[in-house]
Image (spheres, rainbow, N blue to C red):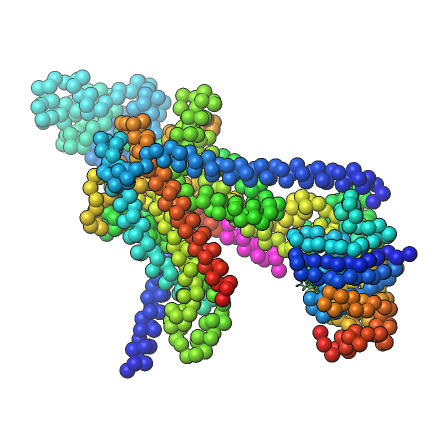
Amino acid sequence: MYNIESKNVDFFYGASQALKNINIAIKPNTVTALIGPSGCGKSTYLRLFNRMNDLIDNTKISGQVLIDGEDIYAKGVNVDSLRKKVGMVFQKPNPFPKTIFENVAYGLRVNGITDKKFIEERVETTIKQVVLWDEVKDKLKKSAFELSGGQQQRLCIARALAIQPSVVLMDEPTSALDPISTAKVEELIYELKTKYTIVIVTHNMQQAGRVSDTTAFFYMGELIEHDTTKTIFTNPKIERTQNYITGRFG
Amino acid sequence: MKTFYKKFSEKFIEGLLMLSGTITSLTVVLIVFFLFKEGLGVFDKKPVEEGYVIALSKSNPLKTLSSEQIKNIYDQKITHWSEIGGKPDSIILFRAEDISNFYSDEEIGENFEGLSTCINRLVDSLPDIIAFFPKKYLAKDFKGHELTVDKVSLKEFFGGKEWFPTAQPSAQLGVLPLILGTLWVSLGAILLALPLGLAAAIFMSEIAKDNVRRIMKPLIELLAGIPSVVYGFFGLVIIVPLIQKTFNLPVGETGLAGSIILGIMALPTIITISEDAMRNTPRAMKEASLALGASKWQTIYKVVIPYSISGISAGAILGIGRAIGETMAVLMVTGNAAVIPHSILEPVRTIPATIAAELGEAPNGGLHYQALFALGCILFLITLFINLAVEFISNRKQHNKH
Amino acid sequence: MELVDENKLAKNKKRNQAIAFWIFRILSYAVVAILFVILSFIIIKGFSVISWDFITKMPEEGMTKGGIFPAIIGTLCLVGGSMLFAFPVGVFAAIYMNEYVKAGIIKKIIKQMTNNLAGIPSIVFGLFGMSLFVNKLGFGDSLLAGSLTLGLLALPVVIRITEEALKSVDNTFRQASLGLGASKWETTRRVVLPIAFPNIITGLILSIGRVSGETAPILFTVAAYFLPKLPTSIFDQAMALPYHLYVISTSGTNIEESRPIAYGTALVLIFIVLIANLLANGLRKYFGKKVKMN
Ligand SMILES: Nc1ncnc2c1ncn2[C@@H]1O[C@H](COP(=O)(O)OP(=O)(O)OP(=O)(O)O)[C@@H](O)[C@H]1O
Ligand SMILES: [Mg+2]
């Protein structure tokens, strides 16, 4: 049983094709890293899973994307519920102009939850989950902008986890962070996979090696190779993958 | 030689540029100087017209009266000396032109030769008289005593409830009704403009398709470009009669008419500034909200508006500032009654409208003239304050971003 | 999460959004409608009044008949005069601020003062112009006094637009020119100004539209109620379109009879603003394309 599957996916920005016939299957509770040179379509692919590309005019998708066996591009799919199930963490920390507490509670509130006690409990457990509780427990009512970049990013992860998605998408989540914050986030990702399926885009080969179970290598809109991370890094079947990993191009 | 020439012209041009650069600062300084020099002159003047005196009988113990008391006496709102701390007798009013009620033409004389003697005798004979007449008819051996009138005081100026700068014998310079009128009309304007303006800004920045926005944007600019007299004229021929009919009023020139026109005029400011602020919301922030399952509308009111709130408030405050300083349109539609308004369906008068309406008739350098400059000072200070407030708010926003 | 009925929630969200968006849409169209009501009212009412005679004839019979020629000429003189002052000074000031002065206290002060000047209400400019130009400097009610007052009013606008135009010029152009040994002024004149020129011109046109409609600053510095002759020197009084509109629609004994003249005058004023806006937008597009092609 796969958590995420994409079958023959093509994607177009206007007339230009950004993804060509992508087939991937991802098991539950794994971390999948998407790697490849800039502009190869990693972000585009990642954003298909929560239909974020719908926001861009003039785009077109063909093929199927299944999450838990359900075609998310089928007619009548409730996009809001889909996005509740598929959380997302962005490249730069982007907390809302609200308090730390309200940032984490946001997803609950917009999804119609009003029970105060429930929200308080959920916010606390989620912040604990991202190992931020000790740092912010005394300033939950302060603006989220007062946190450091690394803290903000962990808060954004908490924000995504608070509505208990089953899949978490991360687009270069550590590229704007210092090494120490990066290490903390990586550690977190490693722990989170016991509960979630994680897909992460990264330019950092070491990071991919450290956190992921499987790795997919993209090149110019095509999926070149998808295998266990160990295989990709030690024994890739395709030469282009090998070249990229060893830094011969890209 | 050539390099010297080049160097010289380079320096010359730099000097010229610098001079131009300082002109705005110089202008502001000059404006402040001229405005306040004339405006503050008010407080060095007496409200009684120069060359006139107000006199009482010798037996009357009162020495000074305020300008308001004098006015009330001549308006017969005060009829007994006891009301202002004197004898219990009723007051006898006298102006120079009343003299023929007391003396014959022969006594006064063809060219008023006998006038000073007549006034002197009259004041002497009537202990309850208050007399107002030109100073040149003050007899050398005057038997009454001249009343000292206080200079215009700050309290009188800002607290006075009546603006009647040409009143005889004592000008009334209370700016309260004008200040209230200005605030009243501007407040009404902003209450009308804010919902419309915000809605349009939200629509343009978050909802409308790009092509719709591309059409609306220049139209809003056009709205900003229409001259204020044209707005005033439109208000005069359309809004004013409409209000008169709708509310069945004696006149349609009301505070409401002013608020409507000013509201329309404030729209472009509010729309442009708040739209700009909202469009500055980072895309990633909006996407983060949508990625959590929020609808577009939830994202707008929970993320976009809070993020751009300082820009939106700056727009609203600037809109108020525009409304407060606007002259012609208000002058044409508000009816210009200098009384404290009790409802929006009454005529009101604003500070700028007062200046525009009265400066032409105020003798250069006189009390009235200076009082109008004092109004200019008030206007200047209000708008300066508003500008600084807007700057403060926008600076705080930049601080927030990092 | 089990607490919430997914379908009901989705329906609610959709409904709320639909309602909110419709309200915004309607209110936005209302704003546009207001503009169209004002414009079409004045265009329809004024159109039948406009004729060659209306534009080229003197007012007659207590301004109830005839044309508005002297007011048009007066406004042209005022616009020309004020721009003659504000344009060079404003462009120079912007060059000084953007190219010469280093960031620091002086720049801050100048910026602040320019902002303050921009926020001063036009009637205050009128007071100032009257006390400085008309009385102190003894120009009397004259085209000179009026033009200078309007020029000062337009100055912050010209400065701001020019500054924006200069700022949008990429720094590499300056560095390239300075690197070739050109002086600062040569660089500004030969490299920066030509690139910024289209935007500066666009701004100039917009501020012309602005100045031509201002009334309060000219009330006491130049405007004549009725003057059936053209100004012959800068020390003459003159009629002006906006003041003319104000006068014939509010004072005088025959407001009703002069209504048509008022509609015509309003239309001419609107026409000027419309042309200025269209021209500015057109230029913006034209130059925008040109820059992209390079
Ligand atoms: N909104 C868009 N409109 C049109 N084309 C786009 C858009 N976003 C991305 N593209 C194009 O699609 C291709 C893939 O872009 P994408 O952002 O997915 O690359 P990426 O692999 O994430 O690159 P990076 O590592 O730099 O983030 C690129 O050629 C890009 O130019
Ligand atoms: Mg990317």
Which is nearer the eye, B338 or A250? Answer: A250
How many numbered markers are drawn? 0
Q: Is residue B394 magenta?
A: yes
* Picture coordinates of residue A31, whole percent (x, y): 84, 63
Q: Which residues are magenta?
A: B389-402
- Residue at image position (39%, 31%) is B236
**Quadrant location of the N terminus of chain B in the rendered image:** bottom left
Q: Is residue B275 magenta?
A: no
Q: Residue furthest right?
A: A1
* Picture coordinates of residue A104, whole percent (x, y): 75, 51
Relative placement, left or right, of B309 versus C11 is left
Q: Residue furthest bottom?
A: B1
Which is nearer the eye, C195 or C253? Answer: C195
In the image, residue C201 sits, relative to residue C187, either above or below, namely: above
* Rendered image quadrant of residue B75: top left
- Residue at image position (63%, 40%) is C21
Which is nearer the eye, B238 or C132? Answer: B238
In the image, residue B208 sits, relative to residue C33, either above or below, namely: below
Secondary structure mainly formed by the magenta segment: helix
* Picture coordinates of residue B372, whole percent (x, y): 33, 40
- Ligand 2 location (quadrant): bottom right
Q: Is residue C50 visible?
A: yes
- Residue at image position (32%, 30%) is C259
* Picture coordinates of residue C129, whole percent (x, y): 30, 48
